[in-house]
Amino acid sequence: MPALLIDRIGELTTNVPELGTGVGGRLHDAAVVVEDGRIAWLGPSAQAPDADERCDADGRALLPGWVDSHTHLVFAGDRTAEFEARMAGEAYTAGGIAATVAATRAASDAALEDNLVRLVGEARRGGTTTLETKTGYGLTVADELRSARIAGRHVDAVTFLGAHLVPEGADPEAYLALVTGDMLAAVAPHVNSVDVFCETGAFDADATRRVLAAAAERSLATRVHGNQLGPGPGVRLAVEHAARSVDHVGFLDDADVEALAGSWSGLSSRALAADAGALASGSGTVATVLPACDLSTRMPLAPARRLLDAGAIVAIASNCNPGTSYTSAMAFCVATAVLQMGLSVAEAVRAATLGGAIALGAHVDGWTDPAGVPQPRVGVVAPGARADLHLLAAPATTHLAYRPGVPLTAAVWRSGERVV
Ligand SMILES: N=CN[C@@H](CCC(=O)O)C(=O)O
Ligand SMILES: [Zn+2]
């Protein structure tokens, strides 16, 4: 692959404070050189070396591609009527998942794959370069396995979510035994992690523990859908089981917030930001907020400001799915986090890039994609990192919140290849 120079960058967000200024490690009048799919050099534009090809950023902002660490893209059908009912005042309940399970089971492999490819393309056009997606709309061994296989062909990380809902007509205990037994055994070679929806109407604390323990026995990373619809044990269980992330986190008490911050062994997000070594070696549970889901379900926005102030590591993800959050637009999630959750633009951008990477374990070199191929770290613009870059049609990332809803993606590179 010929070396590429992107120069005359008005504002470069590296997410590495030592490389620039502030939380975003920003540089101005900067340049980046990309070689063999990785960042080879970055620095002042005036000192940039020659390369085979050149892209003139013309004063615009460059940042890492979005890392969307929570989506549910293997599904068929949509739930427009359910959304309309919600906007007319009905509450969201976990039971809505069953409608998508029925449509997904009835769909052909080709239909599921076409829909997934459509959504991955939509996300790319909005600047997303790393995508996780979950199974969870099959809920039989065969349907979960085909979801995992289809997902693995198109995304960067696949999560098994057999513990999404007890399917209609199934005995809860027998289904849990299936999820933690034969179903997990079938999908394990095809997934990177295991998730469980810990909520009233889905899986209780005991069931959640059993799913997390079964995943740990197979050395699979874990994550939890927790504290989405009300207070509950999800956050506490995620931290106790060293889950990579707990997602939604809408209803938190002080102990939940302290547990999430403390999970990083006293390394606050600020300390981690200032010390790349600590970040690489630290392990804890990321608090993933899903602003579009909070809005689309008319739930209170997750307390992202409080979590950051307490020292937790926060990620922002789209939760793209046909029930609670039918959007892949990470820029919209970032704008909402700034305008309504009280984050600065630099904090929100960091959470939607490096935060998501930490939640996926993709912030360190050598993480593997679903095919088992080792990948360079993502979520930062730094020498050696995967060249996943997002050029905005704006001079500063501030425009993501200053001009909400305006499509600002001008170009996207993934592994050094121009994809948008
Ligand atoms: N909360 C559980 N799962 C999805 C919603 C799935 C659905 O309603 O189809 C979520 O993350 O919001
Ligand atoms: Zn979800």
Image (spheres, rainbow, N blue to C red):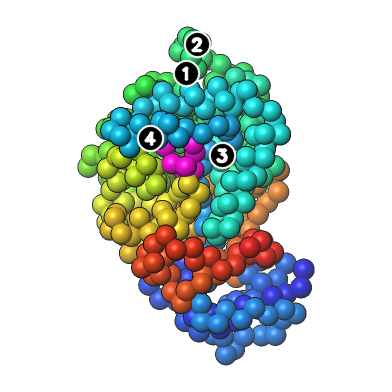
Secondary structure mostly taken by the magenta-highlighted segment of the chain: loop
Which badge, 1 or 3, is on the more N-terminal residue? 3
Count of numbered circles on the image: 4
| Mark toward the start of the polypeptide (2 vs 4) | 4
Q: CA distance from mark 4 to mark 3?
A: 21 Å
Q: Is 325 within the magenta? A: yes
Q: Which residue is mark 3?
A: 73
Q: Which residues are magenta?
A: 319-326
**Residue 224 seen by the camera:** no
Q: Indicate yes or no: mark 3 CB to ligand 2 under 8 Å.
A: no
> Image point 43% across, 26% down: which residue?
96
Looking at the rendered image, the disc whose residue lies closer to the viewer, 1 or 3, is 3
Q: What residue would you read off at disc 4?
A: 84
Quadrant including the N terminus: bottom right
Choose top left, top right, bottom left or bottom right for residue 352.
bottom left
* Residue assigned mark 1: 166
Q: Identity of the amino acid at label 3?
A: Leu
Q: As shown in the figure, which amino acid type bears the numbered disc 2?
A: Ala
- The response on whether ligand 1 sits within 8 Å of label 1 is no
Name the mark nearer the viewer: 2 or 3.
3
The verdict on residue 256 being magenta is no
Q: Which residue is mark 2?
A: 170
The C terminus - image quarter: bottom right
Q: Callout 1: helix, strand or loop?
A: loop
Picture layout, residue 11 above or below residue 116: below
Measure the C-alpha gap from mark 1 to mark 4: 25 Å
The residue sitting at 57% across, 90% down in the picture is: 46
